[in-house]
Amino acid sequence: MGKDEYAYVLEYFPYGMSDSKDRRPSAIVLTESLSLLLVSVKKEGKIEVGKKVYIGEGKREDIHHIITRVPLTKVNERGKELLNDTLDRKIIDDEKRFVDIINRLGPINVKLHSLELIPGIGSKTLQRVLDERKKSPFTSYDDINKRAELQFDIRKSIRERILSELNEADKYRIFT
């Protein structure tokens, strides 16, 4: 995947982050590839929480530069609420992308399969998912839920896994 072009503003700090010596305007954004970044905002930039901003190459209207990646722990409660809403929309809008990932995931080692990193998928569920995937690739979330006989909604499990990855809870990344 190439560089991200756009990101969603989760938090805006007109005087910099409180734990930073740098008092220039900054924001925490969620990129299209699901990374949390701290960005420097231009003085004349018009940033609104919840809005989409251009962070790609070339002339940026609002963002000066990307400062660094940040963990989920840097995001406040309001930002986390917005993150959850944004993720829910993204999981629905990018269904094909996430289903394709589930169709491609393989073993990490002899004892752990990548699919087991998704909350709710244990050894029995893993076997059902793999058996159904062998018959034919999954085409949608509903297809996964029905054919693998999941007792939970795969969309919610995907969101939980993304949040875990953003929180840098473990070393494996499958969605971010």
Image (cartoon, rainbow, N blue to C red):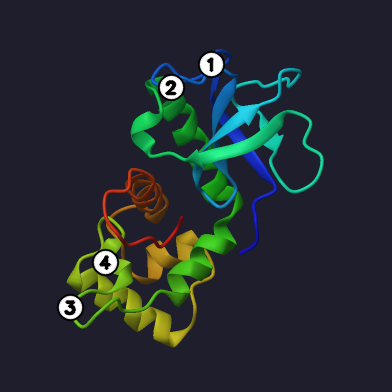
Give the image quarter of residue 47. top right
Q: Where 5 sits versus 120, above or below?
A: above
Mark 3 / mark 2, whichever is N-terminal: 2
How far apart are labels 1 and 2 at the CA level? 7 Å
Q: Position of residue 106 (x, y in %)?
A: 36, 78
How far apart are labels 3 and 2 at the CA level? 42 Å
Name the residue carrying label 4: 116
**Image point 26% across, 63% down: which residue?**
121
Name the residue carrying label 1: 23
Q: Are marks 4 and 2 in contact (CB under 8 Å)?
A: no
**Image point 56% across, 46% down: which residue?**
90
- 10 Å neighbourhood of mark 1: few (<14), some, or many (≥20)? few
Disc number for residue 20: 2
Q: Where 128 sits versus 15, above or below?
A: below
Three-letter residue code for mark 1 = Arg
Three-letter residue code for mark 2 = Ser
